[in-house]
Amino acid sequence: MSELILHHYAMSPFSEKIRLIMGFKRLPWRGVSIPQVMPKPDVIALTGGYRKTPVLQIGADVYCDTALIARVLEAQQPAPTLYPAELPLAVPLAQWADSFLFQESVVWAMQPAGIPAMGTLVSPDQLKIFAADRAAMRGAFPRPTLADGTAQLKAHLAALEAQLAKGGPWLFGTAATIADFSVAHCLWFIRLAKPVASMLKEYPAVSSWLDRVVAIGHHAHVEMSGSDAVAVSAGASGHAPTEVAPGEGFAAGEAVTVAATDYGTDAVAGTLVGLSNTESVIRRADPRAGTVHVHFPRFGFQIKKSASA
């Protein structure tokens, strides 16, 4: 099995989602601790401009967005599965959590009463820089007010409580799915903001379930430097097989850009080498990382034809 390199940082909720999935699947991995804010020279050398966290690297293939990363890990280690065939609604529930529940959780955790706890994990100056960076990253993407976010969060927690109270121990019954990890990373972030995390105690079934998910852990991993990870890409001998499927409206070799459609919408330009109804793959060249294939999910991203790669 090829070496899995996760570019992440400790406080990142989406990184925690993937770290827990690594633990669930008992996959060994290497970690690169990346800056929380720009500039991120090693990350950009690999992705070509995509700046969200985390990113998974396997040789000279780079996978963006945790929905796609989870699928890659499933292919690396199919059992235990994240996607039981008999539970097809686990995927859309995960998509809901990664978008709506995540935004609500961030609003709750980063309210004035919760911010001091975050300041114990990073310095106050770093926290200010982080807030400014994320505001620029969001751009015009709307964020719920504290009042609206609180109302939405409590309604969703009540629904999760009712679901878990039906039997559990996981959201869909006896087996954990991708939905468990997508919901858990949001509530894990609330727990970091200890002064406001007590609201989770109002939902005992949710709290017990979250304890179970977090107890899975991250499995065996060792750290490496960003420069070493870039060197791994430069020294790779090939890429994962990919092709442009017919009927998608694009042809292999076309110059394209790919960008997220919510926030962090920095477009990545390259040459199209793979496209399906679940994934787009572009080839790009970097002076340090060599020839890299950057993979994006189709959900939450937009691919466009470009004048030049």
Image: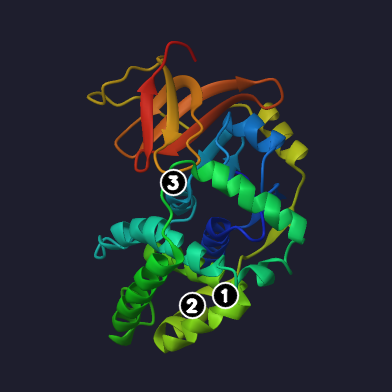
| Local SS, label 1 | helix
Determine if residue 238 is in view.
yes
Mark toward the start of the polypeptide (2 vs 1): 1
Residue 31 in the figure: left or right of residue 214:
right
Vertical relation: 159 (above or below) 290:
below
Q: Which mark is residue 213?
A: none
Residue under the image location 53 percent in, 84 percent down? 198
Mark toward the start of the polypeptide (3 vs 1): 3
- State the CA–CA distance, disc 2 to disc 3: 23 Å
Query: Which residue is label 3 attached to?
Result: 68
The image shows residue 11 at horizontal and vertical percentages of 64, 61
- State the CA–CA distance, disc 3 to disc 1: 26 Å
Q: How crowded is mark 3: few (under 14 residues within 10 Å), some or many (20 or more)?
A: some
Residue type indicated by callout 2: Leu
Query: Which residue is label 2 attached to?
Result: 210
| Local SS, label 3 | helix
Residue under the image location 49 percent in, 29 percent down? 267
Q: Which of marks 3 and 1 is in front?
A: 1
- State the CA–CA distance, disc 2 to disc 1: 10 Å
The image shows residue 160 at horizontal and vertical percentages of 34, 76
Query: Which residue is label 1 attached to?
Result: 191
Q: Nearer the viewer, mark 2 or mark 1?
A: 1
Residue 260 in the figure: left or right of residue 30:
left
- Do the CB atoms of the residues marked 2 and 3 lie less than 8 Å apart? no
Residue under the image location 67 percent in, 60 percent down? 10
Mark toward the start of the polypeptide (2 vs 3): 3
Q: How crowded is mark 2: few (under 14 residues within 10 Å), some or many (20 or more)?
A: many
- Do the CB atoms of the residues marked 2 and 1 lie less than 8 Å apart? yes
Determine if residue 31 is in view.
no
Q: How crowded is mark 1: few (under 14 residues within 10 Å), some or many (20 or more)?
A: some
The image shows residue 208 at horizontal and vertical percentages of 47, 85
